[in-house]
Amino acid sequence: MAEVTDDRIEIANLLARYCLTLDHHDIDGWVLLFTPDARYAVYGRTFDGHEGLRKMMAAAPRGLHLGGPPEIELHGDRAVTRQNLLFVQADTQEFRLSVYSDELVRTASDGWRIATRSCQFMGFDGVLSDRPPRRAAPEA
């Protein structure tokens, strides 16, 4: 039982580091949270491997990532997680409601790492989509 608890703590810390490395703009540290062949799906696109992740972050806005406690399902050296996220964009102070869905693997040298991640956005109707909802034009 202690091993399962340790795995859960390691995974929760991995997902916390995900948010914190982004918030501190530590792209190198962020990329190392993923396996070398990782796949990230967001905004209707897929980014593959460490180089793809770096390209994605080069175009991403900076902001604050407030991740909720993850739901973790352990399957030996693999895990599936889901986590709510509130992202607040630094320059506009606009926010996005999101849900991360992940597949994690335990690596021999680095412990738990993200193998696949998808990010979906909650629309005004509460339905998840691959893209954030468009803001309505201000009423006159």
Image (cartoon, helix red, strand yellow):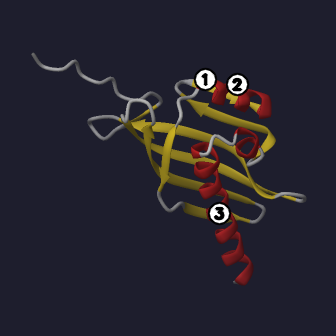
Residue indicated by mark 2 = 55
Q: Quadrant of the N terminus?
A: bottom right
Residue indicated by mark 1 = 59
Instruction: Please give left or right for residue 61 compared with residue 139 in the image.
Output: right
In the displayed orientation, state which residue is furthest to the bottom: 1
Measured in 3D between alpha carbons, the distance from the residue under mark 3 to the one under mark 1, in whole angstroms, is 26 Å
| Dot 1 amino acid type | Ala
Q: Residues within 10 Å of mark 1 (few under 14, many from 20)?
A: few
| Dot 2 amino acid type | Lys
- The disc, 3 or 1, on the residue closer to the chain's N-terminal end is 3
| Dot 3 amino acid type | Asn
Instruction: Please give left or right for residue 87 compared with residue 53 in the image.
Output: left
Instruction: Please give left or right for residue 54 compared with residue 23 in the image.
Output: right
- The disc, 2 or 3, on the residue closer to the chain's N-terminal end is 3
Q: Residue at x 70, y 44 (%)?
A: 30
Q: Is residue 126 above or below residue 48?
A: below
Q: Which mark is residue 17?
A: none
Closer to the camera in the image, 65 or 111? 65
Residue indicated by mark 3 = 13
Q: Is the residue under label 1 in contact with that under label 2 (CB below 8 Å)?
A: yes
Q: Residue at x 33, y 34 (%)?
A: 123
Q: Residues within 10 Å of mark 3 (few under 14, many from 20)?
A: few
Q: Residues within 10 Å of mark 2 (few under 14, many from 20)?
A: few
Q: Look at the numbered disc 1 and give the secondary structure of its residue.
A: helix
